[in-house]
């Protein structure tokens, strides 16, 4: 990636402008080739999304997130940054939570994908979804599907004994504590700042399912 | 409905639905992923092409050449929009910089082109084939350097300078003085949903599904930018994934999607790429603030001065950081001054509580510094200097008598907070309290924010099944508008909330106050109140009841000993009523404001200077709280953002190139779960009959005012290190930590 980036910068002939540099830039387009000019490579991929088998033919550059949002119209998984920085795209793939924007769809042949739509729908909400409503664990709602998918996976991780950065003893079974929840949920940004309520929602569900 | 005399008893006072901590009515849609945001409207435009924005890579200058040939011939590319082929474009009333640059470039990452292709992947790849050369010009990017050339600029419609008494003499004569300069950096809204739009032309009419706080402003600005009649533009923002002021205005996504759709002859969708957003859109400007306080030995303030410098592009606006200093504390001698420097950074503009958010970060730390010099409790210092009239009133009202606040429970907020937080346990001597490895400290700050109201309209329908439907172009940006508007209609029509449907965010609906400046909740619900008054009259007439004597409760309409189900009135056909609330002079007679107090406890690691917030409490006096659950969320969210301003948020300027170098969500750090403890919020009982028939005010911006100062003051109390340059990161603390000696 870094090589491609350097290539791109020099090709565009960017003139670095300092306070004293106010001169015309003579662009030196490097030998233009490749990147983006060829026809897209199309590949078949089959996913099991929310219990249903979905066969897709995709440009291989399509992220799992865009496959869900733009091809399957499952827009519950959100694109907040497209760079794995915000967590809004979190989905559960083969039991583990991942950032769907950071992985290509074609890498997941045969995978079982659970999105927010698969957890529950109005009238039949998943307990975590219902707890988020009850505790007002969201405001604008844009990070919410990612928070909820993460929260469901976090409780499973704790149950499975996966330690975290704040686990005092990584050989002991981790407990559902607010410190564990806050640490494990820190990849999901909520700019509306519903964190205090989200932790209460998850704690309640953990108690219920414990 | 004209609101020009204080409200008396009205149906809202029953508080059967309004005032209840109801769950959000759109909650199940949001938690299940079925709430569709702007970019996600496959239901209306399933065949939209994809646009990808190319941003300028210099801060100031012009495009030398732009070669689109390779990009145009790339697979899937439909069209490329640039300033050269877009036709003449205007600039919106609310925009400072043009949304499509070229050949002139006003700021880094100003949009220069939109590449439209069949797929997102194709548009992105082709965007990287656009070849641009630049002719750069020198720019000014350093506020500290540009400060000396700055000019006075008005704030909030009032003069840049205010003056009461003789500050200079009183300050010189004051036995106890504080004279300190504070700096706050540029801040990004960093809302989770990027600016996004789907645009479609229906003949000469343009429809935009977009993410916007102010439908009517933006409808007008889009029309002005494109040079088409406002009536030919429709905007829909049914869900908005956060705004915080960043979506008050149209941005490049809206204009470019419209231009792209025109050129492509089909709908086009554009989301600003996250790494482009911070330099392409607006931000809260950095400030330099000097505060001088002079006090008698008993803590009575005799002199207050607050001066603020910020920067913006030519034609821009200053940050109004001094504003709360005109309002908060009594002192006979006072001055404020606001100066604006011209900078060539991206456009400065409103962000949550513009002015007060930054202003409290200086004033409320200066008050803490004064309390320490006086040897006085910081809470008591603030109480000592309370006022029930606007202390700077003379500057805004000529020589007229000073205006009273309609309600001002600042002292109650301070005392309630101190009591509930356990403030009496605080050791006023800094650096003395330990909890295990941690140095622990408490800090507090007062909070002030205006409570503006503005005209707002709504339409209310009673359908043939007895369901009440509200339509207004008001937006819900996470604030709870759907719910409080539904609660208002339910209360007025005497039905349960489940019998109300709320439709928001569409320019087909009556024009509302919109979401901004903490005016949304009070204004938009008052507009719904007005429309419901008309609908009640229509219902009474239909049933042959005397409108004056008709009551609405439990789904029944009663007049004397007659009664009928509400639905009966619409059995023969839907009833529709529309009205707006207009506000008279009560906000001139009275100063409408909200008040609060923030209390924070932090731990500071004595060896690493790592800061951890341990407890946070806000006490708010903000009129009638329409929904305590949603209002509390507004406040904790604002406390979280304030914690970010105190501890981490910092758009770093590359002063050589002229842009914010940390322009994504990895490098512009905002609070995450691990940064935020359990938060407490207390709302004082308050109804304000002079603000609106709802007797309500706003609260979403009050919550951020003072938080950062309370954190800063707590860090000082814990560590004994005073940092006046936000954010208070450990590198600024470390050199002075007590254990280093």
Image: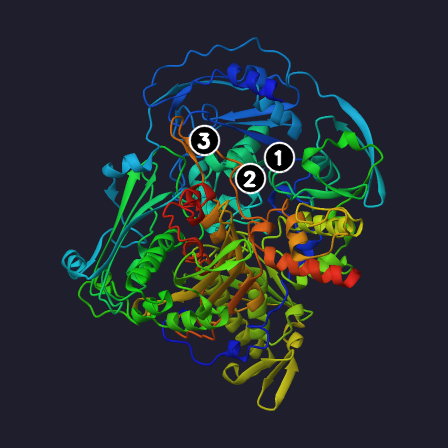
Q: Chain of mark 3?
A: B
Quarter holding residue B574: bottom right
Q: Is residue B623 visible?
A: no
Q: Is residue B201 above or below residue B10?
A: above
Q: Is residue B137 left or right of residue A140?
A: left
Q: Is residue A51 left or right of residue B547?
A: right
Q: Chain of mark 2?
A: B
Q: Is residue B542 above or below residue B57?
A: below
Q: Are marks 1 and 2 in contact (CB under 8 Å)?
A: yes
Q: Is residue B682 left or right of residue B6?
A: right
Q: Give B568 or B552, whichever is nearer the viewer.
A: B552
Give neighbour class at mark 1: few <14, some 14-19, many 20+ (Cα, 10 Å). Answer: some
Q: Earlier in the sequence, mark 2 or mark 3?
A: 3
Percent position (x, y) of residue B563? 63, 85
Q: Give B539 or B624, whichever is nearer the viewer.
A: B624
Q: Give B5 or B662, whichever is nearer the viewer.
A: B662
Quote the CA–CA distance across marks 1 and 3. Answer: 21 Å
Marks 2 and 3 belong to one chain: yes
Give neighbour class at mark 2: few <14, some 14-19, many 20+ (Cα, 10 Å). Answer: many
Q: Which residue is disc 3 drawn over?
A: B110
Q: Which residue is located at x 47 percent, y 48 percent?
A: B647
Q: Is residue B104 visible?
A: yes
Percent position (x, y) of residue B346? 41, 35
Marks 1 and 2 belong to one chain: no
Q: What is the number of the mark on residue B20?
A: none
Percent position (x, y) of residue A107? 78, 30
Q: Which residue is disc 1 drawn over?
A: A83
Marks 1 and 3 belong to one chain: no
Q: Which residue is located at x 64 percent, y 57 percent?
A: A198
Q: Quadrant of the N terminus of chain B?
A: bottom left
Q: Which residue is disc 2 drawn over?
A: B665
């Amino acid at each position: 990636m870094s090589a491609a980036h350097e290539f791109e910068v020099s090709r565009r002939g960017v003139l670095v402008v300092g306070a004293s540099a106010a001169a015309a830039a003579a662009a030196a387009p490097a030998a233009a080739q490749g990147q983006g000019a060829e026809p897209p490579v199309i590949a078949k991929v089959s996913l099991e999304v929310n219990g249903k088998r979905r066969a897709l033919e995709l440009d291989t550059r399509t992220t799992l997130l865009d496959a869900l949002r733009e091809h399957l119209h499952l827009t519950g998984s959100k694109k907040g940054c497209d760079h794995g920085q915000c967590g809004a795209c979190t989905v559960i793939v083969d039991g583990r939570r991942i950032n769907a924007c950071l992985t290509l769809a074609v890498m997941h042949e045969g995978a079982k994908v659970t999105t927010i739509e698969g957890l529950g729908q109005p009238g039949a909400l998943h307990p975590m979804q219902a707890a988020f409503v009850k505790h007002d664990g969201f405001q604008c709602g844009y990070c919410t599907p990612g928070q909820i998918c993460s929260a469901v996976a976090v409780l499973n991780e704790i149950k499975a004994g996966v330690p975290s950065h704040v686990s005092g003893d990584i050989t002991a079974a981790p407990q559902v504590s607010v410190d564990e929840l806050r640490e494990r949920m820190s990849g999901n940004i909520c700019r509306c700042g519903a964190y205090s309520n989200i932790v209460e929602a998850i704690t309640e569900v953990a108690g219920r399912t414990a | 409905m004209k609101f020009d005399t204080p409200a008396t008893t009205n149906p809202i006072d029953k508080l059967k639905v309004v005032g209840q901590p109801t769950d959000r009515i759109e909650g199940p849609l949001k938690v299940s992923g079925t709430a569709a945001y702007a970019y996600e409207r496959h239901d209306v435009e399933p065949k939209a092409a994809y646009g990808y924005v190319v941003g300028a890579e210099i801060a100031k200058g012009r495009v030398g050449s732009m070669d689109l040939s390779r990009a145009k011939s790339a697979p899937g590319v439909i069209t490329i929009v640039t300033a050269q082929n877009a036709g003449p474009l205007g600039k919106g009333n609310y925009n400072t910089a043009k949304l499509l640059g070229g050949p002139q470039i006003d700021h880094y990452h100003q949009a220069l082109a939109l590449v439209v292709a069949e797929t997102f992947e194709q548009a992105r790849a082709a965007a990287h084939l656009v070849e641009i050369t630049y002719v750069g010009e020198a720019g000014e990017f350093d506020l500290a350097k540009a400060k000396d050339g700055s000019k006075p600029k008005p704030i909030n419609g009032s003069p840049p300078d205010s003056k009461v008494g003789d500050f200079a003499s009183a300050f010189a004569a004051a036995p106890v003085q504080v004279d300190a300069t504070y700096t706050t950096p540029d801040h990004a809204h960093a809302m989770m949903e990027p600016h996004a739009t789907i645009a479609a032309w229906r003949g000469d009419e343009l429809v935009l599904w977009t993410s916007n706080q102010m439908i009517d402003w933006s409808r007008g600005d889009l029309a002005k930018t494109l040079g088409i009649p406002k009536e030919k533009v429709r905007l829909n923002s049914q869900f908005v994934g956060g705004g915080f002021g960043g979506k008050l205005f149209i941005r490049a996504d809206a204009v470019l999607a419209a231009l792209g759709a025109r050129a492509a002859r089909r709908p086009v969708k554009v989301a600003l790429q996250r790494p482009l957003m911070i330099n392409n859109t607006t931000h809260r400007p950095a400030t330099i603030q000097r505060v001088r306080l002079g006090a008698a030995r008993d803590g009575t303030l005799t002199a207050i001065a607050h001066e603020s410098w910020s920067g913006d592009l030519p034609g821009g606006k200053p940050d109004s950081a001094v504003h709360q200093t005109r309002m908060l504390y009594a002192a006979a001698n006072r001055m404020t001054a606001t100066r604006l420097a011209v900078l060539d950074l991206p456009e400065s503009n409103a962000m949550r509580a513009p002015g007060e958010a930054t202003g409290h970060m200086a004033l409320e730390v200066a008050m803490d510094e004064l309390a320490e010099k006086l040897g006085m409790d910081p809470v008591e210092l603030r109480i000592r200097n309370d006022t029930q009239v606007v202390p700077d009133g003379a500057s805004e009202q000529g020589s007229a008598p000073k205006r009273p606040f309609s309600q001002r429970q600042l002292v109650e907020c301070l005392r309630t907070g101190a009591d509930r937080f356990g403030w009496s346990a605080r050791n006023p001597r800094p650096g003395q309290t330990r909890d295990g490895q941690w140095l622990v400290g408490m800090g507090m700050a007062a909070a002030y924010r205006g409570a503006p109201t503005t005209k707002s309209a709504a339409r209310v329908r009673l359908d043939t099944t007895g369901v009440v439907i509200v339509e207004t172009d008001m937006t819900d940006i996470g604030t709870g508008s759907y719910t409080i508007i539904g609660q208002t209609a339910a209360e007025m029509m005497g039905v349960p909330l489940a019998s109300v449907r709320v439709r928001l965010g569409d320019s087909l609906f009556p024009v509302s106050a919109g979401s901004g400046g903490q005016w949304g909740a009070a204004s938009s619900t008052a507009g719904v109140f007005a429309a419901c008054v008309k609908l009640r009259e229509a219902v009474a007439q239909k049933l042959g009841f005397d409108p004056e004597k008709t009551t609405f409760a439990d789904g029944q309409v009663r007049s004397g000993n007659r009664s009928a189900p509400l639905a009966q009135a619409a059995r023969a056909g839907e009833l529709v009523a529309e009205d707006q609330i207009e506000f008279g002079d009560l906000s001139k007679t009275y100063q409408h404001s909200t008040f609060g107090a923030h209390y924070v406890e932090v731990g500071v690691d004595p060896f690493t200077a790592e800061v951890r917030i341990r407890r946070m409490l806000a006490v708010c006096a903000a009129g009638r709280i329409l929904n305590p659950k949603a209002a509390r969320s507004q406040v904790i969210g604002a406390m979280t953002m304030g914690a970010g301003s105190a501890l981490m948020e910092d758009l770093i300027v590359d002063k050589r190139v002229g842009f914010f170098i940390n322009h994504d969500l990895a490098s512009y750090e905002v609070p995450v779960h691990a940064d935020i403890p359990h938060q407490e919020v207390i709302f004082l009982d308050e109804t304000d009959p002079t603000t609106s028939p709802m007797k309500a005010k706003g609260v979403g911006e009050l919550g951020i005012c003072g938080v950062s100062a309370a954190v800063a003051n707590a860090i000082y109390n814990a560590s004994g290190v005073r940092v006046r340059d936000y954010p208070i990161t450990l590198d600024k603390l470390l050199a002075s930590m007590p254990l280093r000696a």
